[in-house]
Image (cartoon, rainbow, N blue to C red):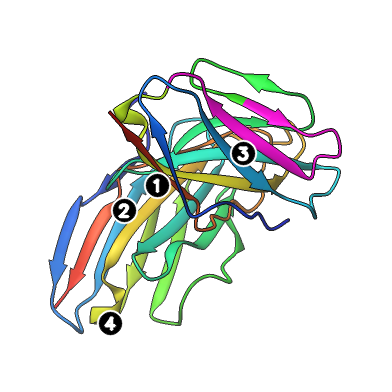
Amino acid sequence: DAKTTQPTSMDCAEGRAANLPCNHSTISGNEYVYWYRQIHSQGPQYIIHGLKNNETNEMASLIITEDRKSSTLILPHATLRDTAVYYCIVKRGRRNTGTASKLTFGTGTRLQVTL
Amino acid sequence: DAGVIQSPRHEVTEMGQEVTLRCKPISGHNSLFWYRQTMMRGLELLIYFNNNVPIDDSGMPEDRFSAKMPNASFSTLKIQPSEPRDSAVYFCASERGQGTEAFFGQGTRLTVV
């Protein structure tokens, strides 16, 4: 699976958009970009994933560049409860084949949302 | 669904003792992952199963660690004998299949003294 690079930490003011970048320059054609977050002491929580199109759900938006070598997770209106470590993961997969591929976590970005 | 259920939530044991961690995946999910998390090493994938079959156990630290999945609704991670360096939070996760997301349990905090 492709390796990802993320900044170690970021700050964001409450109510503002948090934009978390991720580089995955070695991504291959059948690899998806996944984002998870881990709030202190809890299990990681899925946020969003995509292949090549931009995606949006109730939690966040995912913007993937046309060459797929980088992506940005956007939390449109960050709150204090969004303070967490955010992991960008590249994972092989084709939809609904019934079996999983490796899900490997890097060091992530520690996002601190402040008043 | 109650989500991925891990037990116990906390375990304190003496060095040399056997420890068994348990995981019940979400019903209908056919892939299961075991992770270990420490401050020094972050989240490490230990092993994962597809359809109850171990696919990749390259992350299992050594022979003291073993994992089984006897059926689709239950998995164990066993450490025998345990050592203080095994102290960590152990997470279990399950996934329905490729292209879907994994759901994590709340973890088991293991302390070996």
Q: Is residue A72 magenta?
A: yes
- Residue A34's tag is 3
Q: Which residue is mark 2?
A: B22
Residue that numbered label 1 is attached to? B74
Alpha carbon separation for disc pair 1 and 2: 7 Å
The reply to whether label 1 and label 4 mark residues of one chain is yes
- Secondary structure beneath label 3: strand
At 50% from the left edge and 39% from the top edge, which residue is drawn?
A36
Quarter of the picture containing the N terminus of chain A is bottom right
Q: Earlier in the sequence, mark 1 or mark 2?
A: 2
Camera-near label (1 vs 2) is 2
A22 or B41, which lies in front? A22
| Foreground: disc 3 or disc 1 | 3
Q: Quadrant of the C terminus of chain A?
A: top left
Asked if the residue under mark 2 is in contact with the one under mark 1, i.e. CB atoms within 8 Å, the reply is yes
Highlighted magenta segment, given as a residue range: A62-77
- Percent of width and height locating residue B96: 58, 34
Nearer the observer, disc 2 or disc 3? 3
In front of the other: A113 or A84: A113
Q: Position of residue B45 (x, y in %)?
A: 51, 61
> From the viewer's perspective, is the residue at label 3 or at label 4 nearer?
3
* A61 shown above or below A43: above
